[in-house]
Image: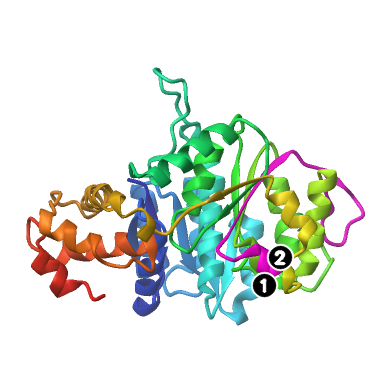
Amino acid sequence: MQKILIVEDEKAISGVLQSILSDELPDYEFVIAEDGLEGLKHIEKEDFALVVSDIKMPKVSGTELLKQALQLKPDTTFVMISGHADIDTAVDCLKEGAYDFISKPIDINRLITSVKNALDKRNLTRTNQVLKVENTTLKKKVNKKYQMIGQSAALKKIQDMIEKVATSDARVLITGPNGAGKELVAHSIHAQSDRSKGPMIEVNCAAIPSELIESELFGHVKGSFTGAIKDKQGKFELANNGTIFLDEIGDMSLVAQAKVLRALQESKVSPVGSDKEIKVDVRVLAATNKNMKAEIEAGKFREDLYHRLSVIEIYVPPLDERKEDIRLLVEHFSKIISEEHGTAQKAFDEKAIAALENFSWTGNIRELRNVVERLIILGSNPVSAEDVKNFVRK
C-alpha cells in the first residue's frame, strides 16, 4: 500500500489532516511526523507517494525538509502548508520543486483537490500507471480504487454505456446525487479509452474560488495578477492527450463557463495574461449533482455549454435505487477496509445485511462505506443486526 507522510508539529492539525485525507484516499496509508527532522528520517527509510508538510516547524523547517528530501529522492512529491506570514517562503518552495502550497486557515476542498491532483501527476509519470490488458477480453482494467461493485440492472446499464462510449472521444456528462459514484464512472471511461496511457486530470469546480478558476483551468503567465510570481500550466494543458474531469461543473461561474465553451469549440486555451493560444487535445468528462435544465432556466448555466458537454449523458442513481447491490458492496468494503487496517476480514451475518438493506442511504455509497468501517471497528465477528442497531443511527 502506498503511503502519505504528514509533517506537522501541531498534533491537532495533523490529526484533522489525516482524518480528512484518509476518507478521501482510502487506498493510502498515512504516517505522521511531528517535525521536519522526524519527517526526514521517515523519507530516508521509505518511499512516500506524497508528503504534506507545514513550513514553520522546530528542528528542521518544511523548506529545509523539502530541499534535503529532494536531494535524497528527487521523485518525492510535496504539498506545503503555510501561514499568511510564510507566503513568500511557500513561493520559494514551489521554485525548489514543491507541487503546491495551501494557506492557513486550510480550505479543506482546496487541500483535497491539490492532494489528488499531485498524486495523479506523480502516478502518471510511473510505469505502473499504465493499465494492464485482460487476456480474455482485451479490455483495459480499471484501477482497483475505481471498481464499480454490484450486479443490479441499474449498474449493468451504466457499465454497458461506459463500454459503448469509452472508445470514442465523445464528451460525457455524468449526473446523479452526491456519493453515488460519478467519479468511478469517469475513471472507468478513461481507463477503457484509447487515452488511458495519457493523464486524467480532475478539477473540483466547487472547490476553487471563482476568481481563480480561470487560472486553474487555463494557466497564467508571470505578473498577470497579484501573486502570479511565475508561469503556471493550466489543467487543460496538463491533460493534453488525455482526459480532464470537470467535477461539480454546475458550480462553475458564468465567466469561466464562457472560457470553457471557447476551449471546447476551438481546442485551444489562452493562459491568463497571455495572447498566446495553446493547442490541446483533451477529452472532457463532466459531472454534476444539480438539475442542469433548472440551472439553465435560472440563468446560472449556459445552455450552449450544456449541449457541448452532454453529447452522452450517464445517470448514476442513488443507492436506494440499487439496494440489491448492498450485499456485494458490504463484502467489498469489508475486504478492503480490513486490508487497510491490517486485520482479518469480518463477515456480516444475514440479519445485519437485511438491516442495512432496509435503511435509506441519503449519503449513498460514500455513507455505506463509512458505516461498514464503523461496524468493522466496533462490531462483533460476524457483524450482527444488534451491532447495526447499536452503532448505526438512521
Q: Left of 372 or right of it: where is 291?
A: right
Amino acid tagged 2? Ile
Query: Residue 334 versus residue 269: which sits nearer the camera?
Result: 334
Q: Is residue 318 depicted above or below 55 in this figure? A: above
Question: Is residue 287 positioned above or below 191 on the image?
Answer: below
Res 196 visible = no
Write the residue at 45% across / 74% down.
57
Tag 1 residue: 209
Mark 2 Cα shell of 10 Å, populated few (<14), some (14-19), many (≥20)? many
Number of on-image labels: 2
For the N terminus, which image quadrant? Answer: top left
Residue at the image point whose x is 51% and y is 55% from the top: 116
Determine if the magenta segment contains residue 278: yes
Q: x, y percentage for residue 261?
A: 80, 54
Q: Which residue is mark 2?
A: 213
Label 1 Cα crowd, 10 Å radius (few <14 / some 14-19 / many 20+): few
The residue drawn where x is 64% and y is 60% is 94
Amino acid identity at mark 1: Pro
- Kind of element beneath mark 2: helix
Label pair 2/1, CB-CB below 8 angstroms? yes
Q: Quadrant of residue 321?
A: bottom left
| C-alpha separation, residue under disc 2 versus residue under disc 1 | 6 Å
Q: Which mark is residue 315?
A: none
The x, y position of residue 51, in whole percent, is 45, 58
Which structural element holds mark 1? loop
Out of 35 and 310, give the one closest to the viewer.
Answer: 310
- Magenta part of the chain: 268-295
Q: Is residue 248 visible?
A: yes
Q: Horizontal placement of 17 versus 216: left or right?
A: left
Residue 86 horizontal/vertical position (percent): 60, 76
